[in-house]
Amino acid sequence: MNELAVLGALTDPASVRDDAASRDCMVGQLPSGGFVMSGPIGGGQLFLYGPDGLYTSAVGRRGSGPGEFGTNIRIQVASNGDLFTMDDSQMRISHFLSDGTYVSSFPAPSTNRPFAQLRDGSFVFHQDVVPPGSSVLLRLDPAGRTTERLERPVSVDHLVEFDTWITAPARDGGFWTASMWEYSILKFTNANEPVSVIKRHVDWFPEGGRYVQGAPVSVSPSPLIRFVKEDEAGLLWVYSVVPDEEWEIGISARPSFEWGRKTFDTRVEVWDLENQRVIATGQFDEWLGGVCGSPNIVYTVSEDENLNTRLHVFEPTISDTLVSR
């Protein structure tokens, strides 16, 4: 993978949180080539960086007023450079211009699940429902009004609170979605039925995955689909986490970069959508964080020689790292 930048120098106003890679949407790439990061310890701000990874300025401050943030902030960068944040601690989406000027905000659905902004500016959320056995996807217009509810059956038997569905924009304006427990990825447009289904039957991702009590501390974790990205060439990149071969009983349950490295590997597969086949695959001894609303880039977290947490941003490429098939 091609490293684009390293964020979080010792001279920055705040340090990068060490669990950033286990949370998606904490980094975005700006049209200028610079970056925005939402993962400083303590939250409360977004950090802006130049293309060289050097800190330039901060957006927002800690609080509950307009343009202010709580502790857990996810970010998406629109094609024009505008910034959209999902403040999980305050359950609201806020809109900023690329220079950090606050525009507006609206309450988010009562869920901490993944969300995606589509090419028309609308949003897709996954929301848990009761009783078990169904999963609701909500489509909201740019002002936060619900325009669609898509109910998808869940074919595996597990607790509703662990029934996370990923979401991602499609190039044609629709969106991709999947239960993280199954390698079965659906594509929707504006209808309530999927127009495409990508399924994979492989030993490393067995069917019938589910949450297992005690994972990952006393039980090896199940494989999970973390996120997908459709690139400008029409290839679908599928990122799954699988148990690390060196996983051992007693690993700490607190997410951190060391926890991610010892507990999971990330497996990447690239699909040729036109011919419905996998054309490249690779496995990495890292927990890769997914970038939302930006090009197909990912990130990892590490410590430097001064024990300072750094965030590394990469662009995956089909090369000798991702082996073509």
Image (cartoon, helix red, strand yellow):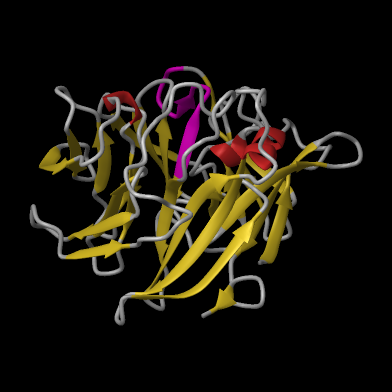
Coordinates of residue 279 in the picture (x, y in percent): 46, 78
Coordinates of residue 272 in the picture (x, y in percent): 38, 77
User: Which quarter of the figure is the N terminus placed in?
Assistant: bottom right
> Magenta span has 19?
no
The tally of labels here is 0
Q: Residue at x 60, y 23 (%)?
A: 253
Q: Which residues are magenta?
A: 64-75
Residue at the farthest front position:
203
Specify whether 90 is left or right of 46: left
Coordinates of residue 172 in the picture (x, y in percent): 24, 69
Specify whether 34 is left or right of 277: right
> Magenta span has 73?
yes
Coordinates of residue 217 in the picture (x, y in percent): 59, 24
The answer to which image quadrant residue 181 occupies is top left
Q: Residue at x 27, y 38 (%)?
A: 126
Q: Is residue 140 visible?
A: yes
The answer to which image quadrant residue 53 occupies is bottom right
Specify whether 67 is left or right of 185: right
In the image shown, does 218 or 89 lie closer to the viewer?
A: 218
Q: Is residue 33 visible?
A: no
Q: Residue at x 86, y 34 (%)?
A: 307
Q: Is residue 186 above or below residue 61?
A: below
Q: Residue at x 55, y 29 (%)?
A: 216
In the image shown, does 159 or 129 lie closer to the viewer?
A: 159
Q: Is residue 44 above or below residue 25?
A: above
Residue at the farthest right position:
305
In the image shown, does 289 or 259 lie closer to the viewer?
A: 259
Q: Is residue 150 above or below residue 214?
A: below
In the image shown, does 325 or 32 lie closer to the viewer?
A: 325
